[in-house]
């Protein structure tokens, strides 16, 4: 496959200028542009028919998902709230147990220290 390149493009433009003349060249350009625009619109309309069908299916699927999502979060929100409550209770219980353990250790240290003081006295 060969490409035209800049020199080939310049040659084609010069030949077009010589063949059609400077007055007809702008008209020819407009005609080619108009033809390409019509072709592009025609291909879009053909593909948009298929895309419309696909988009309609996607919209229906999305609507179905949204409808099921509206009912699902109510249950999951309740479950999430219950889970958070349980986690909070567990954390509070663990913190309470840790504090109780620290207090017992401090009481034991104070008891041992008092016993030492009594033996020394």
Image: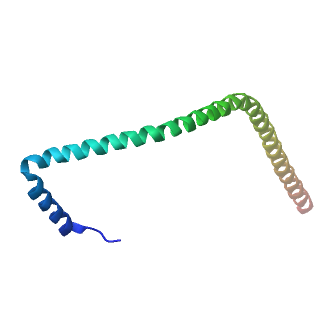
Front-most of residues 71 and 38:
38
Q: Position of residue 46 (x, y in %)?
A: 46, 40
Please identify the quarter of the rendering in which residue 17 is found: bottom left
In what quadrant of the picture does the C terminus appear? Answer: bottom right
Front-most of residues 66 and 51:
51
Residue in view at x 42 percent, y 41 percent: 44
Q: Is residue 54 left or right of residue 72?
A: left
Residue in view at x 20 percent, y 67 percent: 8
Please identify the quarter of the rendering in which residue 67 is found: top right
Q: How is the image coloured?
A: rainbow
Question: Which residue ends up furthest to the bottom in the rendered image?
Answer: 2
Residue in view at x 36 percent, y 43 percent: 40
Front-most of residues 72 and 63:
63
Count of numbered circles on the image: 0
Q: Is residue 45 left or right of residue 121?
A: left
Q: Position of residue 14 (x, y in %)?
A: 12, 61
Residue in view at x 60 percent, y 37 percent: 58
Q: Position of residue 100 (x, y in %)?
A: 85, 46
In what quadrant of the picture does the N terminus appear? Answer: bottom left
Please identify the quarter of the rendering in which residue 12 is found: bottom left
Q: Is residue 39 left or right of residue 80?
A: left
> Vertical placement of 50 versus 74: above or below?
below
């Amino acid at each position: 496959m060969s490409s035209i390149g800049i020199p080939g493009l310049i040659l084609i433009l010069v030949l077009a200028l010589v063949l059609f003349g400077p007055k007809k060249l702008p008209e020819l350009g407009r005609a080619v542009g108009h033809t390409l625009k019509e072709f592009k619109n025609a291909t879009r309309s053909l593909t948009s028919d298929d895309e419309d069908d696909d988009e309609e299916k996607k919209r229906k699927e999305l609507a179905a998902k949204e409808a099921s999502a509206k009912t699902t979060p109510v249950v999951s929100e309740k479950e999430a709230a219950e889970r958070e409550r349980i986690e909070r209770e567990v954390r509070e219980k663990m913190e309470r147990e840790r504090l109780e353990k620290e207090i017992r250790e401090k009481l034991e240290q104070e008891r041992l220290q008092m016993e030492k003081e009594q033996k020394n006295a």
